[in-house]
Amino acid sequence: MGALRNYLETIFSEFPHTENIAEAKQELLAEMEEHYTSLRRAGRSEQVAIGIVIGEHALVDDLKESLHLV
């Protein structure tokens, strides 16, 4: 899913380029894509599903904290 991948690339651009960060990004992308697919199967439009998924993962500070970057 291009929109989700682009979103994560933007968010992770300020993070250090380490193996742990790359793994976290891949895991998060997989979770986001799974949630997107679930929403689409439930009848949500592409734009609505993307908005919901991004909205639920929009807190960069929380992500930094969970990756022990703050």
Image (cartoon, helix red, strand yellow):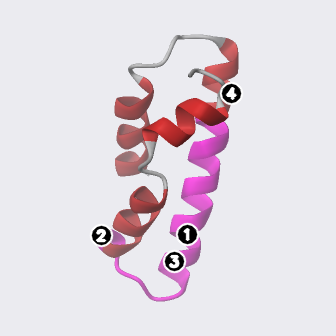
Label 4 or label 3, whichever comes before in sequence order: 4
Mark closer to the chain start, 1 or 4: 4
Amino acid residing under circle 2: Gln
Instruction: Give the residue pinned by disc 4.
Output: 23
Q: Position of residue 38 (x, y in %)?
A: 58, 75
Neighbor class of circle 3 (other Cα within 10 Å; few <14, some 14-19, many 20+) is some
Instruction: Count neighbours of disc 2 (C-alpha within 10 A) and say few if under 14, some if 14 to 19, many if 20 or more.
Output: few
Q: Residue at x 53, y 87 (%)?
A: 42
On the image, numbered disc 1 is attached to which residue?
37
Amino acid at pointer 3? Leu
Mark-to-mark CA distance, 2 and 1: 12 Å
Q: Does the magenta stretch include residue 41?
A: yes
Disc 1 and disc 4 in contact, CB within 8 angstroms: no
Q: SS class of the residue under badge 4?
A: helix
Q: Name the residue under label 2.
A: 47
Specify start and end residues of the magenta stretch as a single range: 25-47
Disc 1 vs disc 3: Cβ atoms closer than 8 Å?
A: yes
Give the SS element for disc 3: helix
Specify which label sits upstream in the sequence, 3 or 2: 3
Foreground label between 1 and 4: 4
Give residue 10's position: percent from left, percent from top: 34, 31
Dot 2: what SS?
A: helix
Q: What element carries label 1?
A: helix
